[in-house]
Image: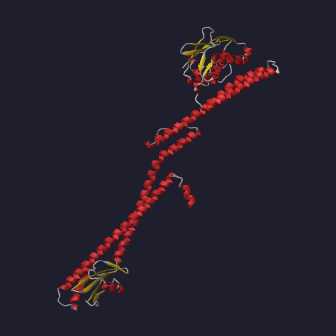
Amino acid sequence: MIEWLAGKYKSIKFRLLFAFSLTLIAISSLISWQLDLSYRTSQQQVLEQQLKMQSRLFSFCLSDHTGLLSSQIDHCAKMQSLIAANNNVYLYNSQRSLIWQMKSASSPTAPPSSLQKLINSPVEDRSLQLLQGRYFLSLSVRGDQRLIISNSGAALALKVSQYRTSLVVYLLLSLMLLLGCFVVILYRGLSPLTKMVAAIENIASGKSDQLQDENVLEFHSMCNSLNNVLKAERVQRERYRNTLADLAHSLKTPLAVMQGATSENLDYRDYLIVASEQIRRMDQIIQYQLTRAVNTMGDGAKRGAVKVTPIVERILTALGKVYREKEVRVILNLDSSVELNADERDLMEMLGNMLENAFKYCRSEVAVSIFSDQQNVFIVLEDDGAGVSEDMRQGILQRGERADTSAAPGQGIGLSVSVDILSAYNCHLEVEDSFSLGGAKFSITFPRG
């Protein structure tokens, strides 16, 4: 029983219903006890008033005579039998000896011990007393004589029993009605919570991505908080997925360089130099992507100045090995003094992706220009490929979008990664046609501040 109750008590509905039932039973018991006590007291007061009225009539009847004759008492007894046929009447003289009694056929004789106690009690005690299951009223008449009226209380007990039966029936009906109403109110009141649980299950099963704002006022804050948590988790999951894709995309170039080195007939020492350089580059890429997965891009902007020209030259050297069969001619216009306040890894990732696209989609020529003024640094990348149409210039900046899916293999990731990095540094990227080479032109404006 205890284990079953402990299992059920985990339910909010059961807790509320159980607590309400206990409270209702306790309050009903207290009310029923108070009502029963009040009814019993009122019936006793009615009986006391009846006995007092009977004693006054008997006393008045005897006071009209000078002597205490048996005929006079019989006359008063006849009056008493008409008034209260269920009562027994006892009359004692000043020496506390019984001089007359009237017994009712329907009421048994009072116990002698109860009568003796009443005889010895003070004369002033005129209240109703309950002795051995009978009610007594004692008072003095005609001087020092004692009149005792007794009632079995059967009628009172019957009334109290009938009242208790009615009270129990009405209380049980009231309890059932209140419990039924509370169950309806409970299920109606907790229905928004049930709907929210169902909505969360839909989110878990992939049928929905957030909670709908259709709950009651008290659940709005919780609904918004859960949606914020879901949004943050979804963003973080997307960020990890993108990071894995970016990592795979970034590792392609050093892997291609190492693969190409195997076909260049290099001796063992030269191959080790190429392999160690690309392995070091791969380790930097992995560390960089892991850092991006947990940190905000652009944190490196607070680091020291980094020269851009050596980074571009290292990237071009690696791409020249990857695309050696294409024999791409690179036109350089580089200002070797240009520096940027950025993370070198961000620049390697951003420029590497954009230059790889230039090598991939060009026909035979790529141009790289770096120059600056007092406020900005400008990096311009051009190629002699097919270019980018105006309607695709915004689309290619989105992850997974490519201008031409047949020109070269790829996933459309590199350029979007570069855009993310540039946005972290408040850079401006413009895509247009190259007038000098006839292909695409990517102009990057990098603020110096």
Q: How is the image coloured?
A: secondary structure
Q: What quarter of the picture does the C terminus occupy?
A: top right
Give the residue displayed 76% in from the left and 23% down from the top. 275
- Residue situated furthest top in the rendering: 436
Give the residue displayed 36% in from the left and 69% down from the top. 37
Q: Pick whichever, 108 or 118, lies toward us.
A: 118
Q: Pick whichever, 176 or 150, lies toward us.
A: 150
Residue 62 higher or lower than 327, as above or below:
below
Residue 429 higher or lower than 239, as above or below:
above
Picture coordinates of residue 307, whole percent (x, y): 63, 18
For residue 262, say whether it is visible: no
Give the residue displayed 58% in from the left and 18% down from the top. 392
Q: Where is residue 256, by image quadrant?
A: top right
Picture coordinates of residue 286, whole percent (x, y): 68, 29
Q: Where is residue 360, by image quadrant?
A: top right
Picture coordinates of residue 158, whole percent (x, y): 36, 74
Q: What quarter of the picture does the N terminus occupy?
A: bottom right
Picture coordinates of residue 67, whole percent (x, y): 19, 90
Residue 289 higher or lower than 36, as above or below:
above
For residue 226, say whether it is visible: yes
Give the number of marks.
0
